[in-house]
Image (cartoon, rainbow, N blue to C red):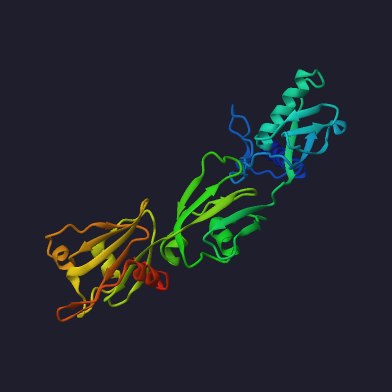
Amino acid sequence: MRNCTRLVKTFAVLALSSLAAAQTQNGSWSPASMPEPGQAAARPAEPSSVPKIAIGPGDMLDVEVFDTPELSGSTRVNQSGEANLVVLGTVHLAGETPNQAARTIEEALRARGMMNDPHVSVSITEYATQGATITGEVKTPGVYPTLGSRTLTDMIALAGGPSPLAGKTVTIQHRSDPAHPLTVMLAANPRALAQQDNPVIEPGDTVTLAKSGIIYVLGAVTKGGGFLIDNNEHITLMQALSLAGGWTTVASTSHAQLIRKVPQGREEVRLDLKHIVKGKEADISVQDGDILYVPTSFGKTVGYRSVEAILTAAQNAPAYAYVY
């Protein structure tokens, strides 16, 4: 009886070994990959990083019809968005992703009675625009290649980095969805920049780095010049003055001027800075292009300057980045 039991176990081991060897020849196999009773074997997951780039005029497509080489081949999309396919003729594919285009071709094959159950794959082998356009406040605007996986910060670096007047707002117009541009706010410092949202830039995309706003504080202040701020930010008159280190001991605080560009030209507002500090007057908001000028005062003599002279001084003033 014991010999019989041992013989059964031996045959069972040999059978399992043969099954494992057969599975190894046909592909990888492990007990963990076996489906539970009553369950279907799971299909491999689709890659989550497959780009969904729409087909556009000028793109070269590779169309493969499974087990039907006479219907397969390469074709270039014309300016009307149509691809001239083997035997099938012209099919409009512009605006569709490669997967959508494959389903469109399958439907056309069935509708024309050429195949009952076609299986088609479409891939873009050559883009009409192989790179992305970088414009706005970068040092060297232009079209740069998007080979591999290029991110937003990669593309800005390829364009030489932000210009001295660059703001923090970036607009990305995806070729696959031009009607819905994406806005990204760049972080204020390199450490935060490494952790921020950094979308992938695809062929045909357009990236625009906006210009920063600038506020000028001139005259009897510690550090006169232009101060770069993002156009989405709002700072007050006193905050702008603090960027310049405040007024000096020779400042005539009761005769300050705020010069602002308006549709009709230039508007000049007289200010008493000490009244604003004490809360007697409102601390108003300043905006892009504003000039705060603090004149000097020696005894009872107040040093006034014309608006034209102040504008000339602003044009020649150094620009400083706004430190958060």
Q: Position of residue 322 (x, y in %)?
A: 36, 66
Q: Position of residue 33 (x, y in %)?
A: 62, 40
Tell me which corner region of the image, top left, top right, bottom left or bottom right, holds residue 302: bottom left
Whether residue 202 is visible to the viewer of this picture, yes or no, is yes
Going by the image, does 86 lie left or right of 27?
right
Tell me which corner region of the image, top left, top right, bottom left or bottom right, holds residue 108: top right
Whether residue 117 is visible to the viewer of this picture, yes or no, is no
Going by the image, does 172 lie left or right of 234?
right
Q: Is residue 322 above or below residue 264?
A: below
Between 16 and 138, the one lying in front of the other is 138
Identify the residue shown where x is 65% and y is 49%.
203
Q: Position of residue 7 (x, y in %)?
A: 72, 39
Between 23 and 6, the one lying in front of the other is 23
Going by the image, does 211 lie left or right of 99?
left
Residue at the extreme right: 70
Q: Position of residue 176 (x, y in %)?
A: 60, 41
**Split into 4 quadrants, where in the image is the N terminus?**
top right
Q: Is residue 128 above or below residue 318?
A: above
Identify the residue shown where x is 86% and y is 27%.
87
Identify the residue shown where x is 33% and y is 74%.
224
Going by the image, does 265 lie left or right of 19?
left
Between 20 and 199, the one lying in front of the other is 199
Identify the residue shown where x is 53% and y is 54%.
208
Tell me which corner region of the image, top left, top right, bottom left or bottom right, holds residue 219: bottom left
